[in-house]
Amino acid sequence: MAAYVNKFYPEFVVELASQHEKKVNEKRPIPIRIISYISRILKALFTLKIFYHLSLKLYLTGYIVGYITLNEKDI
């Protein structure tokens, strides 16, 4: 659903806090969001948080496939 909303209704995309009790940031530009996501993937890899790293990569794979294949009338 994240890919669907980003593709067809980007005005409804909201930022979420990265950790509990952290302040929610204002909406960031896409390049900053991409850099942030890549840094989380690398940090999870280097700190040996294998399952978190795997979940980030699987989420990214689903997002890319969804963004490429979804049509607005699919939902």
Image: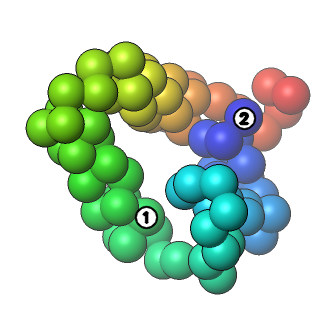
Rendering quarter of residue 24: bottom right
> Taking 60 as reference, is 42 left or right?
left
Query: Where is residue 5 drawn, in percent x and y?
Result: 73, 48
Amino acid type at image mark 2:
Met
Q: Pointer 1: what residue?
A: 33
In the rendered image, residue 42, in percent from the top left (x then y), is placed at 19, 43
- Please name the residue shown 19% across and 27% down the image: 48
* In the depicted structure, whether residue 3 falls above or below residue 9: above
Residue 25: name its quadrant.
bottom right
Q: Is residue 18 positioned above or below 28 on the image?
A: above
Q: Is residue 61 visible?
A: no
Q: Is residue 7 left or right of residue 57?
A: right
Q: Amino acid at mark 1?
A: Arg
Figure quadrant of the N terminus: top right
Disc 2 vs disc 1: which is toward the camera? 1
Q: Residues within 10 Å of mark 2 (few under 14, many from 20)?
A: few
| Tag 2 residue | 1
Residue sitting at x 37%, y 18%: 51
Write the residue at 43% across / 64% down.
Answer: 33
In the image, is 12 to the left or to the right of 23?
right
The residue located at (13%, 38%) in the rendering is 46
Which residue extends farthest left? 46
Name the quarter where the C terminus is drawn.
Answer: top right
Q: How are the residues colored?
A: rainbow
